[in-house]
Amino acid sequence: MSFDPISTYQEALHNFTDATRRVEACVNTIIDAAHKLQDWKSVCVSNTSIGFPARVASSGISINAMDWPTAEQLAQALASWHVTRSAVHNAWLMIPGDRRPGLQPPSD
């Protein structure tokens, strides 16, 4: 089987897109929680074994513990993003210039 730099690039780009999606999911969850915590006296955390007073639980301002990434999950997502970004860049460089038209170079 011969080496196809365009297929390699497309696979790397697919992996990078998935890694970006995972990081953005973590970041969006954290940003959402940060916005809610600006009024922290009205916030409860759902899906935990911790109870909250009825007035807080009924406020409708809740952070879902099941959605919250651990530090390990966040680190893995960020590290994966950096690795896959480098892979896209390296795959892009392996495509001969005359075969690049229509393909986009990697971007953040």
Image (tube, rainbow, N blue to C red):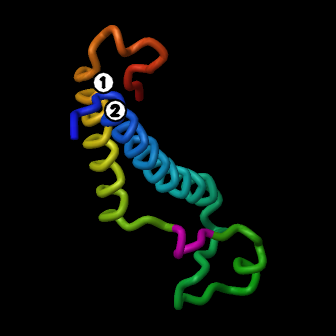
Using the image as rendered, state which of residue 98 and residue 31 is in the foreground.
98
Q: Quadrant of residue 7?
A: top left
Q: Quadrant of the C terminus?
A: top left
Give the residue pinned by disc 2. 9
- Dot 2 surroundings within 10 Å: few (below 14), some, or many (20 or more)? many
Residue depicted at x 53% and y 91%: 49
Using the image as rendered, state which of residue 36 and residue 77 is in the foreground.
77
Using the image as rendered, state which of residue 51 and residue 15 is in the foreground.
15
Q: Is residue 95 above or below residue 108?
A: above
Element type at mark 1: helix
Residue depicted at x 44% and y 12%: 101
Dominant SS of magenta comes to: loop
Residue 92 tag number = 1
Residue depicted at x 27% and y 29%: 91
| Residue 21 drawn at (x, y percent) | 49, 48
Task: Identify the amino acid type marked 2.
Answer: Tyr
Task: Identify the amino acid type marked 1.
Answer: Trp
Residue depicted at x 71% and y 80%: 57
Q: Is residue 56 above or below residue 19?
A: below
Residues marked 2 and 1 touching at CB (< 8 Å)? yes
In the picture as drawn, the residue positioned furthest to the top comes out as 98
Q: Is residue 41 magenta?
A: no
Residues rendered magenta in the picture? 63-67
Residue 104 relative to residue 96: left or right:
right
